[in-house]
Amino acid sequence: MKKLVITMSLMLSLVVSSVAHAHFVWVVQNGEKVQICFSESADSPEPELLKNVAAAKVWSVTHGDRDGSAMAEVPLTLTEESLAGTIETKVDAVIVSHEYGVVNKGHATFLLKYVGKQHVSPLPGRWSAINDAEHLPLEITPAWQGRKLALTVTFQCKPVAGMEVKVGGCGIDETLTTDEGGVAYCEPTADGVLSVRTKQVDETRGELNGEQYDSIRTYSTLTLPLTVPSIESVSHTLPALSQGITSFGAAILGTDVYVYGGHFGAAHHYSESGQSNEFRRISLTMPNAEWELLPSGPKLTGLAMVEYGGKLYRVGGFTAKNSDDQDQSLWSQDSFACFDPATGKWTDLTPLPEGRSSHDAAVLDGKLYVAGGWKMAGSDNPTWHKTAWVCDLTQSNLTWTALPEPPFLRRAISLAASKGKLYVMGGMEEDGGPTTQVAAFDPIAQAWSVAPALHGKGMEGFGTSAFAAGDRLVVTTMSGSVQALSDDGSKWTLVGQAAEPRFFHRQLTTSGGRVLVVGGASMTTGKTNSLELMQFVVK
């Protein structure tokens, strides 16, 4: 028996001496299939070697939007071509762990372990660390910082300084070293799959299956499909809002930003004292500009505001009629009003045909379109709107005309115009919860159609904001992803990541084509009063 153990140890040593110096365990996900590679990089399966890691364990990981992560083991099947399993496509990450065995190499005898990870979600805001010392003791977690990719290395969930990190693919081939915070930086130059690996040596003696070892060597890999950002945050001197707000109206008129109303009270509870009727303006071009208070109006949340012809148009919203210590009594409004900067006054216009809030509005070819939302009336159950409306702002007598019935019942949507069509992004469905589905309306054909869905799971479409930046329709989502509709309208492309993720914010476009993000809230930090400015760059 002792001779058999020695023989097996010798065989393992021979195998490792031929592959360990250049072969690592990678986990690669493609749709519902997850595959293990035992090779130098994630894009080289080398199936003839997979039998050496056939005992590897794989788990899928799904991050909760409010709670912790859920983990499920993925059974693997070894064939001549692959070591693979099947997962659900909506998971956020897949991890692998394999204890190779005791290895004799030169004068060293060590226990060899492999772990690895792939972030399945293409959304950088979902690239959260697993933080599981048992299943993934040595972890590499990426995050975009502008156009640089920060790679944080942790061991037992703690950052490690001075770690060597090898990075290949996406136009780079580098060996990096983590700083005092455990972070190494690289700058990918091309879309593709990035292969990242690092090694940790633990000088701990031990025994496995009767074999002694002097240390433990753990190799960790990261497989990361990447789209290099084409939009990035730029510095600006615009001051923050006076307080954090959500579900407000905002628009850019000329070189000024206007903000109206919104909610600044406690999350998930609306009251009269937590609503704003403030109407403010700030110049985008004036040095040292400050927010200027303008004539206000009713307290409104969940409203829309747009610009056309040098004026602002405010549409709908709801008013709370309860105090903080009372049950909510929320009333959707049918108000429609115009603000003329030349006179500094609001003018009431023809009301909407029904009260509406949690909707959005956009202007296309001089016509104001309103879609989505519901009607709240105190203690009555809300009515989800089956209607959408258009008002021709070029006419002196403003009236509302019904559009063909939308093929959805949604609130908390965003609505934007681009290339002759209107797009309704995401929202909350009456039945089915949050969604990333997108609908398009063609004013010429007077017809609705299904457009490509946004990237991400359902919550990614909840409380988005969208606007056309030049010839690109751009939407910002709760994870901070910045997505742009392709030129042919066939898909959404990830073009960047906001520095401060938020939802129920407002995204606007300056005259120079820059994207301005105002207010909103984060699932983790709550409401924000900050402004973020982004611009497109050439890859």
Image: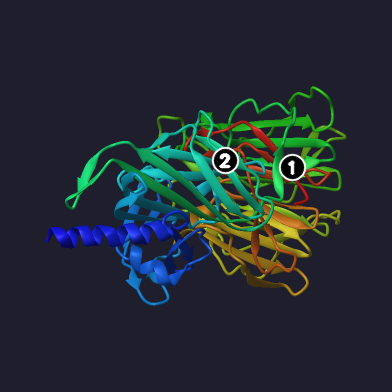
Q: Is residue 334 above or below residue 59?
A: above
Q: Nearer the viewer, residue 235 or 59?
A: 59
Q: Nearer the viewer, residue 172 or 440?
A: 172
Residue hosting label 2 = 176
Classed neighbour count for the residue bearing mark 1: other residues with Cα under 10 Å, few (<14), some (14–19), many (≥20): many
| Residue 134 visible in the current orientation | yes
Q: Viewed as shown, does residue 505 lie left or right of 272? A: right
Residue hosting label 1 = 251
Tell me the quarter of the image containing the N terminus. Answer: bottom left
Residue occupying the point 40% across, 41% down:
200
The x and y percentages for residue 133 are 33, 42
Q: Amino acid at mark 2?
A: Leu
Q: Nearer the viewer, residue 246 or 222?
A: 222
Q: Quadrant of residue 248?
A: top right
Q: Nearer the viewer, residue 204 or 121?
A: 204
Does dot 2 land on a helix, a strand or a loop?
A: strand
N-term-proximal mark, 1 vs 2: 2
Mark 1, mark 2: which one is toward the viewer?
A: 2
| Residue 268 visible in the current orientation | no
Q: What's the CA distance linking mark 1 and mark 2? A: 44 Å
Residue occupying the point 45% across, 37% down:
269
Q: Look at the numbered discs 1 and 2 and tell me whether their residues touch, using CB distance below 8 Å.
A: no
Q: Is residue 315 above or below residue 39?
A: above
In the picture as drawn, the residue positioned furthest to the left comes out as 1
In the picture as drawn, the residue positioned furthest to the bottom comes out as 80
The x and y percentages for residue 54 are 32, 66
Q: Is residue 346 above or below residue 22?
A: above
Residue occupying the point 86% across, 53% down:
396
Q: Give the numbered dot on residue 271.
A: none
Q: Quadrant of residue 80?
A: bottom left
